[in-house]
Structures are given as C-alpha cells and as structure tokens.
Amino acid sequence: MGILKKIFGICETKKPEDPGCWIISGGRVEIDLKRAGELSRQGGAIRLEGKSLADRILVIRGDNGLFYAYKNKCTHMGRRIDPVSGSQYIRCCSVMGSRFGVTGEVASGPAKGALKIFKVKIEDNKLNIYIS
C-alpha cells in the first residue's frame, strides 16, 4: 500500500463488483455467494457500505476457507481495515499500522481494542451476517 493511501486512510478492499449481491433483511446482511465472486477464493474480500447499513462491514474468506465479517473501523483512529494477503491478519489502512488476528484481537500496533466481529452463517449458498 502506498504512503499517500495510508496517510489518507484509503483501503484497498473494493466494494463488490455486483452491487446486487447483498441485501439487508431483518437484522442481518445476506450475501449471495454465487454473485460475490470476490469471496469464491481463499483470501478474497469485499467491503459493504450504503444501502442504509449502519456500519461499514469488511467480509473476508480467510486462508483457512472460513468467512469472517468485521465492523470496518480500526479501534485506533477509526479508519477502514484490510486483510493482509497470504496471512491470517487484518490491518488498519492508516500510517499507524495496527494489525489484528482473524478473530479480531489486537496483534500489534496502537489499536485500543479488538475489532467488532459479526456472527456469520452459511445457508443455501448465502452468507448471513448478523448485525443486530
């Protein structure tokens, strides 16, 4: 990641190529995994924003094949977060460089606490993220 991106807190994780791959329904976000190609491979990630979503969400498919969903906000300066390719870590997209394990715990850096992680469940090729 370039230094200017870090200074301005610009994350590398993109929104889904198919913006219709996810909906909010009854206290959960539902992602149609058939339409979210970014999550078809280990290490894939998308960021969800808008659609009346109260908090931005980072969704990753870990190198272990499991899905994780986080409130997309570092606990240090409130910047967005990104997965670290080829590892089991999440990093803050700012200059300070806090790192977190996939379960949200602080691994290094000045972060003040763990990331908020949402419960996820796969049903009928849909990833459900429980946000309330």
Image: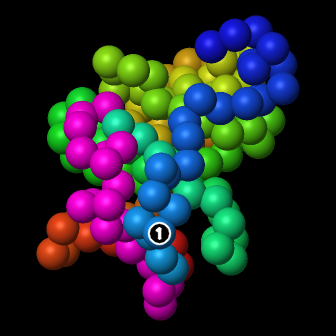
- The residue labelled by disc 1 is 20
Residue shown at 46%/30% (left/top)? 83
State the quadrant of the N terminus. top right
Of 110 and 73, nearer the camera is 73
Queried whether the magenta region covers residue 110, the answer comes back as: no
Vertical side of 42 occupied by 25: above or below: below
* Residue 109: quarter of image: top right
Residue shown at 26%/70% (left/top)? 126
Q: Is residue 130 visible?
A: no
Where does the magenta region start and end?
25-43
* Residue 55: quarter of image: bottom right
Residue shown at 51%/79% (left/top)? 24
Of 123 and 39, nearer the camera is 39
- Percent x, y of residue 57: 56, 55
- Percent x, y of residue 71: 58, 54
Of 73 and 113, nearer the camera is 73
The secondary structure type at the circle numbered 1 is helix
Of 76 and 55, nearer the camera is 55
Give the farthest residue toward the bottom: 26
Residue shown at 32%/18% (left/top)? 86
Question: Could you tell me the amino acid type at mark 1?
Answer: Gly
Q: Is residue 54 visible?
A: yes
